[in-house]
Amino acid sequence: MIKVSINDNLEEEKFILITIIGITESLLNNTITIFDAEKAIFSPFSVNLLKEQNIHESIIDLVEQGCELEDIESLLPDKLNDTISSIKIEAIKLLTSLKHGQSVEKWLID
Protein backbone atom coordinates (compact mmCIF):
# COMPACT_ATOMS: atom_id res chain seq x y z
CA MET A 1 0.00 0.00 0.00
CA ILE A 2 1.24 3.46 -0.89
CA LYS A 3 0.26 6.30 1.42
CA VAL A 4 0.34 9.97 0.52
CA SER A 5 0.53 12.56 3.25
CA ILE A 6 0.52 16.26 2.49
CA ASN A 7 -0.11 18.77 5.25
CA ASP A 8 0.34 22.01 3.33
CA ASN A 9 -2.37 23.47 1.08
CA LEU A 10 0.09 24.63 -1.58
CA GLU A 11 1.70 21.19 -1.70
CA GLU A 12 -1.75 19.58 -1.93
CA GLU A 13 -2.60 21.77 -4.89
CA LYS A 14 0.71 20.92 -6.60
CA PHE A 15 0.11 17.21 -6.07
CA ILE A 16 -3.41 17.39 -7.49
CA LEU A 17 -2.31 19.39 -10.53
CA ILE A 18 0.58 17.01 -11.24
CA THR A 19 -1.88 14.13 -10.95
CA ILE A 20 -4.30 15.80 -13.36
CA ILE A 21 -1.49 16.46 -15.86
CA GLY A 22 -0.34 12.85 -15.70
CA ILE A 23 -3.85 11.45 -16.02
CA THR A 24 -4.77 13.67 -18.96
CA GLU A 25 -1.52 12.81 -20.73
CA SER A 26 -2.25 9.12 -20.15
CA LEU A 27 -5.76 9.54 -21.53
CA LEU A 28 -4.46 11.31 -24.62
CA ASN A 29 -2.01 8.45 -25.20
CA ASN A 30 -4.69 5.82 -24.63
CA THR A 31 -2.68 4.22 -21.82
CA ILE A 32 -5.57 4.47 -19.34
CA THR A 33 -9.33 4.60 -19.72
CA ILE A 34 -11.76 7.23 -18.56
CA PHE A 35 -12.89 4.69 -15.97
CA ASP A 36 -9.30 4.58 -14.65
CA ALA A 37 -9.21 8.39 -14.53
CA GLU A 38 -12.48 8.44 -12.62
CA LYS A 39 -11.10 6.00 -10.05
CA ALA A 40 -7.97 8.11 -9.67
CA ILE A 41 -9.41 11.62 -9.33
CA PHE A 42 -12.20 12.55 -11.75
CA SER A 43 -15.14 11.73 -9.47
CA PRO A 44 -17.75 13.59 -7.43
CA PHE A 45 -16.16 12.06 -4.32
CA SER A 46 -12.87 13.78 -5.18
CA VAL A 47 -14.66 17.07 -5.83
CA ASN A 48 -16.28 16.97 -2.39
CA LEU A 49 -13.04 16.01 -0.69
CA LEU A 50 -11.15 18.84 -2.41
CA LYS A 51 -13.82 21.32 -1.35
CA GLU A 52 -13.49 20.13 2.24
CA GLN A 53 -9.73 20.67 2.01
CA ASN A 54 -10.20 24.25 0.73
CA ILE A 55 -8.44 23.53 -2.55
CA HIS A 56 -8.55 26.46 -4.98
CA GLU A 57 -11.77 26.59 -6.99
CA SER A 58 -9.89 26.57 -10.31
CA ILE A 59 -8.42 23.18 -9.46
CA ILE A 60 -11.78 21.83 -8.34
CA ASP A 61 -13.23 23.05 -11.63
CA LEU A 62 -10.68 20.97 -13.54
CA VAL A 63 -11.65 17.88 -11.57
CA GLU A 64 -15.32 18.60 -12.29
CA GLN A 65 -14.51 18.90 -16.00
CA GLY A 66 -12.79 15.53 -15.76
CA CYS A 67 -15.98 14.09 -14.26
CA GLU A 68 -17.75 14.96 -17.51
CA LEU A 69 -15.38 13.06 -19.81
CA GLU A 70 -17.52 9.93 -19.93
CA ASP A 71 -20.51 12.02 -21.07
CA ILE A 72 -18.41 13.78 -23.69
CA GLU A 73 -17.09 10.44 -24.91
CA SER A 74 -20.62 9.12 -25.43
CA LEU A 75 -22.31 12.30 -26.70
CA LEU A 76 -19.55 14.21 -28.50
CA PRO A 77 -16.70 11.75 -29.12
CA ASP A 78 -15.04 14.09 -31.64
CA LYS A 79 -14.59 16.65 -28.82
CA LEU A 80 -13.07 14.24 -26.30
CA ASN A 81 -9.38 14.77 -27.05
CA ASP A 82 -9.82 18.55 -27.26
CA THR A 83 -11.53 18.54 -23.87
CA ILE A 84 -8.81 16.38 -22.31
CA SER A 85 -6.12 18.64 -23.82
CA SER A 86 -7.87 21.71 -22.48
CA ILE A 87 -7.91 20.27 -18.96
CA LYS A 88 -4.23 19.40 -19.25
CA ILE A 89 -3.23 22.83 -20.54
CA GLU A 90 -5.16 24.60 -17.78
CA ALA A 91 -3.58 22.34 -15.14
CA ILE A 92 -0.12 23.19 -16.48
CA LYS A 93 -0.94 26.93 -16.37
CA LEU A 94 -2.18 26.64 -12.79
CA LEU A 95 0.86 24.61 -11.72
CA THR A 96 3.15 27.18 -13.32
CA SER A 97 1.40 29.99 -11.44
CA LEU A 98 1.86 28.39 -8.01
CA LYS A 99 4.72 29.47 -5.81
CA HIS A 100 7.66 27.16 -6.18
CA GLY A 101 9.68 26.50 -3.12
CA GLN A 102 11.40 23.72 -1.32
CA SER A 103 8.89 21.16 -0.09
CA VAL A 104 9.41 20.51 3.59
CA GLU A 105 7.94 17.03 3.64
CA LYS A 106 7.91 14.09 1.28
CA TRP A 107 4.57 13.22 -0.23
CA LEU A 108 4.96 9.44 0.05
CA ILE A 109 5.20 7.95 3.50
CA ASP A 110 5.53 4.48 4.93
Image: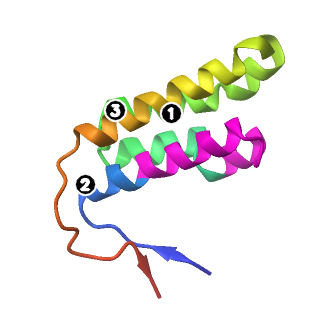
Horizontal arrangement in the rendering, residue 104 relative to residue 33 (left or right): left
Q: Amino acid at mark 3?
A: Lys
Q: Are marks 3 and 1 in contact (CB under 8 Å)?
A: no
* Vertical arrangement, residue 68 with respect to residue 42, above or below: above
Q: Inspect the magenta stretch and tell me whether residue 108 lies in it.
A: no
Q: Residue 100 in the image: x percent, y percent?
A: 19, 53
Q: Earlier in the sequence, mark 3 or mark 1?
A: 1
Residue depicted at x 47% and y 88%:
110
Q: Earlier in the sequence, mark 2 or mark 1?
A: 2
Q: Amino acid at mark 2?
A: Asn
Q: Please identify the dominant SS of the magenta region.
A: helix
The single residue placed furthest to the bottom in the displayed view is 110
Q: Inspect the magenta stretch and tell me whether residue 36 lies in it.
A: yes
Q: Residue 95 in the image: x percent, y percent?
A: 32, 42
Q: Which residues are magenta?
A: 16-39
From the image, state whether disc 2 or disc 1 is nearer to you.
1
